[in-house]
Amino acid sequence: MRKESELYAPIKTYFEAIGYQVRGEVRHCDMVAIRPGAPEAEPIIIELKSSFNVTLLLQALDRMKLSSTVYVAVAKKKATRSSHSIHGLRQLCERLGIGFLLVTFYKRKAPFVEAICHPPGWTSTEQGSLYKPKPVKTVKARTSRLVREFHARSGDYNVGGTTKQPLVTAYREKALRVANVLQEGPLRAAVVRSRAGVGDAASILQRNYYGWFERQSRGIYTLTPEGTTAVTQYANIIAKLPGLSQ
């Protein structure tokens, strides 16, 4: 059975090919896609599962509070190769107003992503005439937080569908920038702010959410052993953060 995380790369490639920017694990969503230059457009949310089940549908319905454009994506298995089985799943997704992506994996060539159906707004006339799902009211505040988190990240450092691994959120990115600068030794918060390019560096140092920083004296901070470990653990991420000198 394929892992959920194995679906991430082919789905990301699918949406990037049609002009979207993609991030993994954004505010509990496995994947979020946003078209650059279209600030008013709703984000696309994709939920990944190794197999089609009720849990996946419930997750998708919950994500519709954030966006009306939600897809579920699963790997194609022997159990879903029957055209009758796929047709039934397609009808179910259409009735719920959810898009359905099927990923076929091969031994010697790249995976193939097939759009079985699209959410309302993406559907054909024939498909849309089958059933008009009841709109789910999105919560604008939650949608705004999702979009802000998406844009606050400098890159895509998480693989959607992974579990039990720390996520590189926008906040963690900033904390890593601060920690990277403090490798030089104890520094004033104002100096850290300037060198790290993090406007709220002082707040991050004072809050010390991850336990990486220690106040040495008034306004002066240094790294804790945990902070030093984090710099090593996330060295590959720090190397990718724009504007940082290593």
Image (cartoon, grey):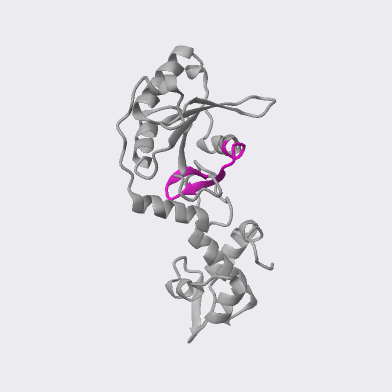
Q: Give the farthest residue toward the front.
A: 125
Position of 223 with respect to 46 (left or right) is right
Q: In this rendering, is residue 23 above or below 244? A: above
Instruction: Tell me: 95 left or right of 219.
Output: left
- Residue 172 lies, in percent from the top left, at 51, 61
The answer to which quarter of the image holds residue 227 is bottom right
Q: Nearer the viewer, residue 177 or 225?
A: 177
Residue appearing at x 69%, y 68% in the figure: 245
Range of residues picked out in magenta: 15-34
Residue beneath the point at 44% across and 12% down: 84
Q: Position of residue 140 (x, y in %)?
A: 35, 50
Q: Position of residue 39 (x, y in %)?
A: 49, 51
As drawn, 35 above or below 152: above
User: Considering depth in this image, is 184 or 137 the residue closer to the camera?
Assistant: 137
Left or right: where does residue 87 sit relative to residue 220? left
Q: Quadrant of the C terminus?
A: bottom right
User: Can residue 132 be found in the magenta stretch?
Assistant: no
Residue 117 seen in render: yes
- Image vertical order of residue 28 relative to residue 7, above or below: below
